[in-house]
Image (cartoon, rainbow, N blue to C red):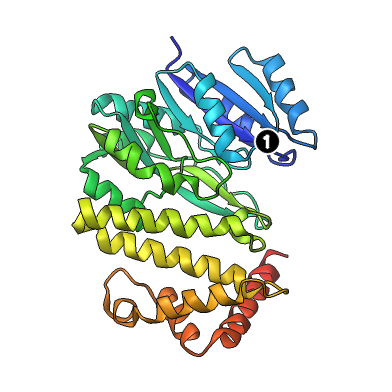
Amino acid sequence: MTEISIIVPVYNVESYLKRCMESILAQSFQNFEVVLVDDGSTDTSGMICDEYAERNANVRVVHKANGGVAAARNTGIEESRGTYITFIDSDDYVERHYLEVLYRSIRNQNADLAICDGEIVMEGRGEREERKACDWEGEIGDAEVISKAEAYKRMLLAEHMCITAWEKLYHRNLFQGVRYPEGEICEDTYVLDQIVENSNRIVCTRYKGYFYVIRGGSLMHGEMKPMHMTALRNAKHLWDFMAENYPEAEDAAKKFYYNNCFQVINLMVMDPEKKYRAECRRLRKEILREGRFFAFHRTIGWTEKAAWICLLFGLPWYRWVWGMYLKIIRGERK
């Protein structure tokens, strides 16, 4: 019986896929299968998938027409055979004890959802070296069972865990009746409450075993598209859900929503055609009404405060400051 199914959505990642796959195949825990879902790649990614499947009996490939990452994950869920499911994006990679830590944590605590931490790797700044002396066994021993409310708060505030499909190990029963909304972005936010509410016991560890690579063309770091508005809708859904069911986590959901608002504004103000001017002004007014929250709430950091102040001086000023920040970041990557 296969214990873990690793679902890897693949779309035009020929420069990253081998690194991802080599990190998976090098895992200390080996009772797993890899389901590579080639989502209509137009580069050599599909061929690379086939090569790995030919060389490794525990690797399978599903080739499908392009439908987006949500559709690819749903296909992977349907094709998976393991007792547990985990997702790894094809441009990311994992530390060699990643599966071991999640699996032993979930089994030791008789949980059905295990969550770990991760690290961000900026493309162009060099690959993050895996920690040679990683105390992964100690991280398993320090894993703690947390309530649903605490899980929501930590993910919404990105405190050693985040709202993503990855960095988690799920019992496959959690996906009964749950699928990612196809054709959307930030689809992880949409299903978060369904996954957590289906969980009877949640365990978390501060082990940093997942390396998230931020690429220049990533959906939330590229140009503004209408689909980006779904990020706000899904974040607002979580805010409303917390307010009704977990009031102790409402402020965390509120901060998460406004962080998403800032991400969308950052894309809107850089649109040369200014197609989203009216929506951008509406979001600015909405954010500025929350001056007391941004000024005094304990979860608001200096970056959020600075962003709010920049908005206060108007969108042209905000656009100039954001443009300068992007130039500095891009300059550091060279």
List the single residue furthest toward the top.
1
Compared with 173, 330 (above or below) is below
Asked whether residue 54 appears in the rendered view, the answer is yes
Which residue occupies the foreground of this view, 85 or 193?
193
| Number of other residues with Cα within 10 Å of mark 1, as a class: few under 14, some 14 to 19, many 20 or more | many
For the point 56% across and 58% down, the residue is: 228
Horizontally, residue 13 falls left or right of residue 195, namely: right
List the single residue furthest toward the front.
278
Give the mark count.
1
Residue 253, image quadrant:
bottom left
For the point 44% across and 40% down, the residue is: 167
Image location of residue 233, percent across then percent down: 45, 57
Compared with 313, 29 (above or below) is above
Horizontally, residue 46 falls left or right of residue 146, namely: right
Query: What kind of residue is marked 1?
Result: Leu
Residue indicated by mark 1: 17
Quadrant occupied by the N terminus = top left
Image location of residue 284, percent across then percent down: 48, 78
Image location of residue 53, percent across then percent down: 68, 18
List the single residue furthest toward the bottom.
313
Horizontally, residue 99 falls left or right of residue 109, namely: right
Image location of residue 286, percent across then percent down: 41, 76
Which residue occupies the foreground of this view, 301 or 30?
301
The secondary element bearing badge 1 is classed as: helix
Quadrant occupied by the C terminus = bottom right
Asked whether residue 153 appears in the rendered view, the answer is no
Compared with 187, 326 (above or below) is below
Compared with 291, 78 (above or below) is above
For the point 26% across and 29% down, the residue is: 111
